Image (cartoon, rainbow, N blue to C red):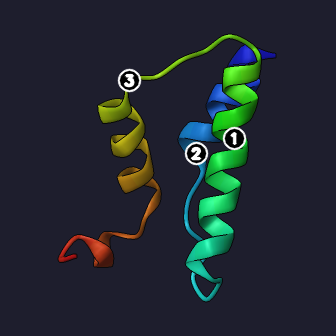
Amino acid sequence: NKLYLLKDFVKLKYKKGTPITDHSSEFQGCFDQLSGVGLKFDEDVLGLFLLNSLPDSWEKF
């Protein structure tokens, strides 16, 4: 179960045309599920996962 949740978290990508708040909620939900099964992440690593989930075109921001 942990592996399945982690894979979903790592594969999570922003869906073009959807509000960023929806993506943020989905990201937070995945993180909450991982926390619920005992997986914890350093804030720096969590930030990297979030940046990785955004499109390359957002790199300028």
Image quarter where the N terminus lies is top right
* Residue located at (63% from left, 27% from top): 6
| Circles 3, 1 touching at the beta carbon (< 8 Å) | no
**Tag 2: amino acid:** Lys
Q: Nearer the viewer, residue 36 or 12?
A: 36
- The answer to whether residue 13 is left or right of residue 7 is left
In this view, 46 is above or below 13: above
Report which quarter residue 30 is drawn in. top right
Image quarter where the C terminus lies is bottom left
CA distance for labels 3 and 2: 19 Å
* Residue located at (75% from left, 25% from top): 4
| Circles 3, 2 touching at the beta carbon (< 8 Å) | no
Taking the view exactly as shown, the residue that stands out farthest to the top is: 38
Mark 3 or mark 2: name the one nearer the start of the chain.
2
- The answer to whether residue 33 is left or right of residue 12 is right
In the rendered image, residue 28, in percent from the top left (x then y), is placed at 64, 48
Report which quarter residue 17 is drawn in. bottom right
Report which quarter residue 13 is drawn in. bottom right
Q: Nearer the viewer, residue 58 or 11?
A: 58
Q: Write down the residue under mark 3.
A: 42
Say what secondary structure mark 3 lies in: loop
**Tag 3: amino acid:** Asp
CA distance for labels 3 and 1: 15 Å
- Closer to viewer: mark 3 or mark 1: 3
Q: Write down the residue under mark 2.
A: 11
Say what secondary structure mark 1 lies in: helix
Q: Write down the residue under mark 1.
A: 30
